[in-house]
Amino acid sequence: MKFTYEDLDLSAEVAQDLTEFGPDLEVIAIYSTFPEVPNVDFVTDYLWGEPKREAFESEAEYEEAMNDYLESLETLKERKYKRMSLYELGKIIQKQAEIFKKKVS
């Protein structure tokens, strides 16, 4: 049985963020495994990395973003994840899509 994973919404979101924020944006890639292939990890989502103070106009905006960031980290407690640049994430998503295309052909 062949199993593949490609998430077109995730691919589109990464492409849009690359255009809007550039390749150096720090993100946290979230991996999932599927029962069909328990030894293979697939990136299925991502979070933005820690907010930078200089990116915000006010201390209140920064604190709100930091609180959101800390809350999002709570969702990672039982998950596999890796910090990386948005560019690196894009490459992984592209590789997952290429694997999908090869197996469908």
Image: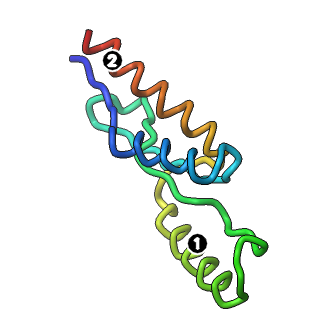
Q: Residues within 10 Å of mark 1 (few under 14, many from 20)?
A: some
Picture coordinates of residue 35, whole percent (x, y): 28, 36
Image quadrant holding the C terminus, namely top left
The residue under the point 39% across, 45% down is 10
Instruction: Classify mark 1: helix, strand or loop.
Output: helix
Q: Using the image, tell me which numbered label, if any, was put on residue 13.
A: none
Q: Which residue is mark 2?
A: 101
Q: Residues within 10 Å of mark 2 (few under 14, many from 20)?
A: few
Horizontally, is 12 left or right of 82 in the view? left
Horizontally, is 38 left or right of 15 in the view? left
Identity of the residue furthest to the bottom in this view: 60
Picture coordinates of residue 103, whole percent (x, y): 30, 14
* Distance from the alpha carbon under mark 2 to that under mark 1: 34 Å
In the rendered view, tell whether residue 51 sits above or below residue 42.
below
Identity of the residue furthest to the left in this view: 1
Q: Which residue is mark 1?
A: 69
Q: Amino acid at mark 2?
A: Lys
Horizontally, is 24 left or right of 13 in the view? right
- In the image, 91 versus 21, the foreground residue is 21
The residue under the point 47% across, 54% down is 79
Q: Determine which quarter of the picture holds residue 64.
A: bottom right
Image quadrant holding the N terminus, namely top left
Q: Determine which quarter of the picture holds residue 68.
A: bottom right
